[in-house]
Amino acid sequence: MRTAIVLFTRDLRVHDNPALTTAADEAERIVPLFVFDDAILGSAFARPNRAAFLIDALRDLDASLTRRGARLVLRSGDVVTETLVLAGNVKAEAVFVAEDASGYAQRRQRRL
């Protein structure tokens, strides 16, 4: 496989990340992606301290990815829509995402 997207959601680490590891084994080029989910950002979950923690974690993730030759792509909106748009733009053949047990994440994964 030539190009794959790794969609980062809850698991914002490079070390021991199953989605990233699988993508690296199967694709020549990896496009790392994080989407600021409008549904989550518009909810009570989006508190200032959580947002600040997320921004710090994304900076750290981008630095780790940059050291490995890839920059983190950031988008905002519906996660599935933004992922599919990017997949079309980069001609990705697959999207890899780590499993998540929450109902919201499982619905998102089915939509993908």
Image (cartoon, grey):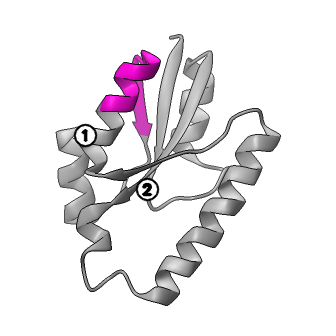
Q: Nearer the viewer, residue 97 or 62?
A: 62
Crowding at dot 1, Cα within 10 Å, few <14 / some 14-19 / many 20+, comes out as: some
Could you say where residue 70 lies in the image, as x and y percent from the top left? 69, 35
- In magenta segment, residue 89: yes
- In magenta segment, residue 107: no
The answer to whether residue 108 is above or below residue 83 is: below
Looking at numbered disc 1 in the image, what kind of residue is underneath it?
Answer: Thr
Q: Nearer the viewer, residue 37 or 9?
A: 37
Q: Nearer the viewer, residue 77 or 67?
A: 77
Q: Which residue is located at x 58 percent, y 69 percent? A: 55
Could you say where residue 38 lies in the image, as x and y percent from the top left? 28, 63
Q: Which residue is located at x 57 percent, y 58 percent? A: 12
Residue at the disc numbered 2 = 9
Q: Which residues are magenta?
A: 85-96
Q: Which mark is residue 81?
A: 1
Could you say where residue 13 lies in the image, as x and y percent from the top left? 63, 56
